[in-house]
Amino acid sequence: MLAKLPPLGWNSWNTFGEKISDSLIREMADIIVEHGYRDAGYEYLVIDDCWSLRDRDENGLLVPDPEKFPYGMKALADYVHAKGLKFGMYSCAGVMTCAGYPSSYDHEFTDAQTFASWGVDFLKYDFCNFPETGDCRTRYQTMSMALKSTGRDILFSACNWGQKEPWKWMRSVGAHMYRSTGDIMDNYRSFTDIFRSQLDNLCMSAAGSFNDMDMLTVGMGGKGNVGVGKTCTYEEYRMQFALWCLCSVPLMLGADLRSVAPEYEALMKHPGLLRIDQDAECRSPYVIRKGSVFTSNPDAKEGEMPWRQIPDSSYTIFRHLSDGEFALAFINLSEAESTIHCELVDLGLPVSSGFALDVRDAFTGESLGAKRDYFNQHVPGHDMRLYLCRLVRSHA
Ligand code: GAL
């Protein structure tokens, strides 16, 4: 079965855009292995847009750009496979890709055959230049059938940016993951907006077909193709990675793994966080509490309250994991520090239950002991706390 768990990998777009080549992809394959990303679970190495010539050949086939990919795609796929990785490529459901390269509208079966003949294991399928008269659902279904017709296991990564509520139908057309938002940018606002926008849709994301909240920008530091606005701090990148894991969504890394700082490399391979992302039950998060952060307002005019309300910025989120574990997150999306509350009765643990939660910090591994009745956390602005918990008898 493909996509039994959220797929993990690396994609060229966020950092490299059109600046892709055979040597870059080979180097990235080497790094993924040498730096232990493969052993941490990252298996798909995906080339995004801009890999082909501007025209099909005389037989109507897609042609890799010989300057960027002088040995062709089969040779590159062989190299990637020899490293124990899987090889991903990109096309689009419209008549041209977003960057203006030939696309698969009305070429679905031919192109699927081409990809299969090159040894492709993963197809990201975009939505630019889609005809006004076209039916989105039918065209994704068509590519899904085309991929199936090849007889090769090709993971279908449908990227329609959340148009037409894909969480309602992408599973039924065979997609293994489906992009649910517009493009991520390498800044705080972008990834927190994506997170907020998908919380209610994640109940449809599970084994076989996952909500794709887009490729990560963790560790990019404003370098590359999606660096718009102020880049993120360590705590903000940690939040991005932890939120994606909490949501049990695909983790497609986007940073240049050849030069990423060691703290980000460690974050992207963090066993406690990956354990949450890759939990066998793939359950969606349960929002226990969502609210405002209140902060003092020194600019308040006479007669105004001396505080300010920042709505939709404080979350307590719980998730059932397998093997008797749970994840519990306290998320502060505002810029002001705040105390975030959790009454254990809201997790289904009233005092009368006689049970408490044994709590371990998912970032540091540190044990916080057993918590009963309530568990409040003071969280700095733009930061979160994330715990792995187990039920224990309460001794009070
Ligand atoms: C966008 C897509 C991005 C990237 C880009 C390539 O539509 O959302 O992830 O693939 O096209 O041109």
Image (cartoon, helix red, strand yellow):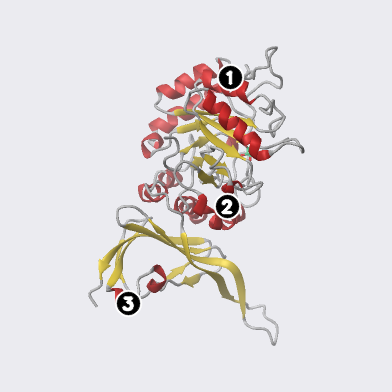
The circle drawn on residue 351 is 3
Residue at the image point whose x is 68% and y is 29% from the top: 105
Tell me which amino acid carries mark 2.
Phe
Q: Residues within 10 Å of mark 3 (few under 14, many from 20)?
A: some
| Distance Cα–Cα, label 1 vs label 3 | 64 Å
Label 1 sits on residue: 69
Q: Residues within 10 Å of mark 1 (few under 14, many from 20)?
A: many
Residue 252, x across and y down, in percent: 50, 40
Tell me which amino acid carries mark 3.
Val
Residue at the image point whose x is 55% and y is 58% from the top: 200
Labelled pair 1, 2 in contact (Cβ < 8 Å): no
Q: Is residue 239 above or below residue 296?
A: above
Q: For numbered disc 1, what is the local secondary structure?
A: loop
Q: In which quarter of the view is residue 369 placed?
A: bottom left
Does residue 370 appear anywhere in the picture?
no
Q: Quadrant of ligand 1?
A: top right
Q: Is residue 93 above or below residue 370?
A: above
155 or 133: nearer the eye?
A: 133
Label 2 sits on residue: 191
Left or right of 200: which side holds 102?
right
Labelled pair 2, 3 in contact (Cβ < 8 Å): no
379 or 138: nearer the eye?
A: 138
> Which dot, 1 or 3, sits closer to the camera?
3
| Distance Cα–Cα, label 2 vs label 3 | 37 Å
Is label 3's Cβ within 8 Å of ligand 1?
A: no
Q: Is residue 286 above or below residue 154?
A: below
Image quarter (top left, top right, bottom left or bottom right) of the N terminus: top left
> Which dot, 2 or 3, sits closer to the camera?
3
For marks 1 and 2, the one nearer the N-term is: 1
For marks 1 and 3, the one nearer the N-term is: 1
Q: For numbered disc 2, what is the local secondary structure?
A: helix
